[in-house]
Image (cartoon, rainbow, N blue to C red):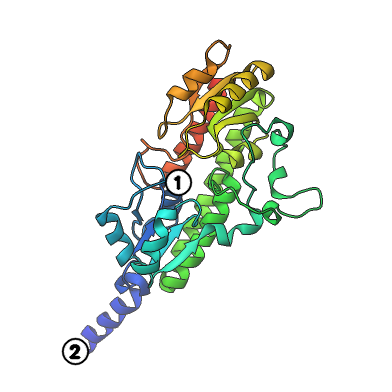
Amino acid sequence: MNRIYLILLLLIITATPLWAESPVPRVAVSIKPLHSLVSGVMQGVGKPDLVVKSGGSPHGYVLRPSEAQLLSRAQLVVWVGHELESFLEKPLATLGHKAMQLELSDELEPFLLSVRQGGGWESHAHKHEGEHMEDDHGHGDHQRTKPDLHLWLDPAMAKRIVTLTAKALTELDPARQSQYQANAGQMNERLDQLDRRLKEKLGSVKEVPYIVFHAAYQYFESAYGLNVVGSITLDPGRAPGAKKINEIHHKIKELNARCVFSEPQFESRLVATVIEGTNARTGVLDPLGADIPEGPDAYFQLMSRLGDSIYQGLK
């Protein structure tokens, strides 16, 4: 009888996955779009914590005690970088000093675009799809000084983020490597499908000029060859002066811009001011998905909504 029990015990042990007793890594992610991509890689294993909750913007964000606690117990922190989430610099230097950091602006540096200078860029804004990855000499835009860190707004960049996340999680939790890799593969397939849908939807409005509230959408615009001709402000934390508002107003008339897009996180009355007396319509773009429920589907909803909003504003 004891021999039978021993055989049964051995069968149970060998049938139990090695990761069944391994603790799930504690992961903190700065903003919702990144959180969605990380959530997708962790499906079936666990859920990462989101630091900046719905409605918040990483520009000038103030960390709450509960959010600092998330960082203090995290084993992995995923964020864009110092110039976007500057509020994380000190906490990560103290609270999260023991955590592995996946700083995407460092990891993806060869693929980053340069920050646009000035509020109007129609002379070089209308690029063809994929042009943002290389200049005329085949070198990435990273050779220029200051990078644009709104890097998640391109499915091609999102695929790189997914791959980097799976690699980091595997380093922390090698017993679940196959799960992370399988999830990453499924996420990247979904991202390819998303990219095809957006190209199909936006193809008919690629030539139509428009203006955005702040220069946050360069990756999206470059990926789909859109004809954005300027922004009301480069820094959403600083209100533009009267001279800048007059310049944008003149640009709308001169270029016959079809639409001026505001954002839910920032002052929208400026948009009403700059379009007064023009034929331009208004729309809303949200690069963070403020009202979208967090989780693996949030990124896809955010990007689909961006595509829909731009299409509706320009058609």
| Callout 2: SS | helix
Give the mark nearer the N terminus: 1 vs 2: 2
Q: Residue furthest bottom?
A: 3
Give the left or right position of residue 229, taking residue 52 as reference.
right
Task: Name the residue at 61% across, 51% down.
Answer: 147
Q: Residue at x 44, y 40 (%)?
A: 288
Judge whether 3 appears above or below 289 on screen: below
Q: In the image, which disc is placed on residue 33? A: 1
Q: Quadrant of the N terminus?
A: bottom left
Q: Residues within 10 Å of mark 2 (few under 14, many from 20)?
A: few
Residue 2 is tagged as 2
Question: 36 or 50, which lies in front?
Answer: 50
Q: Residues within 10 Å of mark 1 (few under 14, many from 20)?
A: many
Q: Percent from the top left, x then y, of residue 193?
A: 57, 41
Can residue 257 be seen here? The reply is no
Q: Position of residue 72 (x, y in %)?
A: 31, 65
Where residue 126 sits, quadrant-wise, is top right
Residue type beneath disc 1: Pro
The mark found on residue 78 in the picture is: none
